């Protein structure tokens, strides 16, 4: 994690650094054995977008209910969604992994494409999702978004609502003011936790008093404490999370970042009339329970639930509490 809460503009910094996890490598475009293995797996389909580049998708399951999964990031991979294959297909629900353009398993942008700002907008990704839908021959389907992917799901549903049976909006805050407030709050909570750790007492005292302190030590302590309390509360990171971290394309993430909150999501919400499910982890750093409840009231037909003892990646923190509610929503609105 590399969330720099020492700056004033929490949201801008958050977008530049992560919407889930920071890459462990400088060049996320280098391909490893996982990449080549995935390309040969059953259900994989590459879809050409605008005749210019392809994106990677994979169908898991043969149920009659279809769910398209939109990963976070920006520019992460689908890999942290692999846990979904253990819970949904055996309930008659087919899931579709999909790496957005520039993400690890899809085509990587050329230098010319990287400099084309029109490619790195949420509105452009909405049109990409629509082409993916057509390429997968999905008519009435459920769209699921996590973190940044939730914003894509919201913007897509607003424009292409007739194709969507229901939308799942997990662990994100579409209201900029609320987003900033929540991140600021959890950043302050992290400092409070560090204040209770004896070896950081002197450092934190100097920071509070505006005196000189070791910023590298502070940032490392902040990041690990923040991650452990508000992102993923497990003692050991699962393999799928480690691969997601390694495969994140930070270059593309920085390109998309400025567009993340460029759309008026608040204006879209009242016009979405299909069933909506909102989810957050109990300790999610992006949205509070109070904010989630308020958000649910803005939709025409929405429900929400909070996953106990879970952070931002709550389906990995507490799958036993996460998936039953998700499956119930999908089944009930199919």
Image: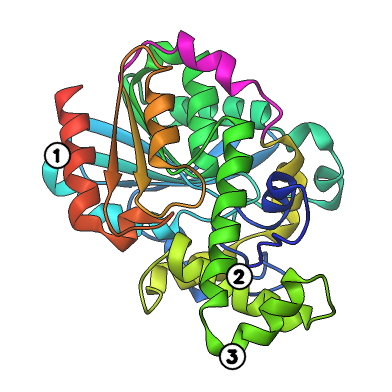
Q: Secondary structure at mark 1?
A: loop
Question: Magenta region: which residues?
Answer: 261-275
Specify which label sits upstream in the sequence, 3 or 1: 1
Where's residue 317, x and y in %? 32, 62
Where's residue 183, x and y in %? 59, 49
**Residue visible at 39% across and 16% down?**
163
| Residue corresponding to mark 1 | 92
Give the answer, above or below, for where 180 lies relative to 86: above
**Alpha-carbon span between mark 3 and mark 1:** 52 Å
Is disc 2 surrounded by few (<14), some (14 to 19) or many (20+) residues within 10 Å? few
Q: Secondary structure at mark 2?
A: loop
Farthest residue, direction front: 209
Q: Is residue 118 left or right of residue 54?
A: right
| Residue corresponding to mark 3 | 199
Image-quadrant location for residue 179: top right
Task: Give the number of the mark in front: 1 or 2.
Answer: 1
Where's residue 173, x and y in %? 52, 36
Q: Is residue 149 left or right of residue 7?
A: left
């Amino acid at each position: 994690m590399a969330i720099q809460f020492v700056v004033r503009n929490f949201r801008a910094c958050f977008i530049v650094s992560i919407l889930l996890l920071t890459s462990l490598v400088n060049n996320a475009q280098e391909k490893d054995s996982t990449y080549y293995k995935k390309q040969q797996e059953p259900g994989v389909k590459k879809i050409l977008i605008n005749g210019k580049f392809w994106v990677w998708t994979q169908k898991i399951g043969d149920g009659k209910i279809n769910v398209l999964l939109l990963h976070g990031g920006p520019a992460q991979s689908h890999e942290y969604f692999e846990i979904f294959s253990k819970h949904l297909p055996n309930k008659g629900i087919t899931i579709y992994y999909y790496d957005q353009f520039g993400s690890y398993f899809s085509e990587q942008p050329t230098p010319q494409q990287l400099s084309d700002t029109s490619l790195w907008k949420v509105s452009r990704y909405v049109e990409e999702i629509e082409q993916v839908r057509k390429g997968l021959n999905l008519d009435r389907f459920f769209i699921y978004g996590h973190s940044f992917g939730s914003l894509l799901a919201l913007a897509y549903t607003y424009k292409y609502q007739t194709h969507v049976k229901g939308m799942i909006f997990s662990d994100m805050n579409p209201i900029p003011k609320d987003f900033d407030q929540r991140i600021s709050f959890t950043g302050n909570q992290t400092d409070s936790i560090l204040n209770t750790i004896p070896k950081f007492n002197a450092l934190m005292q100097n920071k509070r008093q505006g005196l000189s302190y070791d910023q590298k030590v502070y940032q490392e302590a902040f990041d690990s404490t923040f991650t452990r309390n508000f992102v993923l509360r497990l003692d050991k990171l699962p393999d799928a999370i480690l691969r997601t971290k390694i495969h994140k394309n930070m270059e593309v993430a920085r390109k998309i970042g400025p567009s993340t909150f460029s759309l008026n999501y608040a204006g879209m919400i009242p016009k979405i009339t299909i069933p909506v499910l909102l989810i957050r982890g109990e300790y999610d750093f992006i949205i509070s329970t109070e904010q989630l409840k308020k958000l649910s009231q803005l939709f025409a037909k929405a429900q929400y639930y909070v996953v106990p003892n879970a952070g931002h990646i709550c389906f990995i923190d507490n799958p036993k509490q996460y998936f039953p509610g998700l499956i119930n929503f999908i089944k009930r609105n199919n």
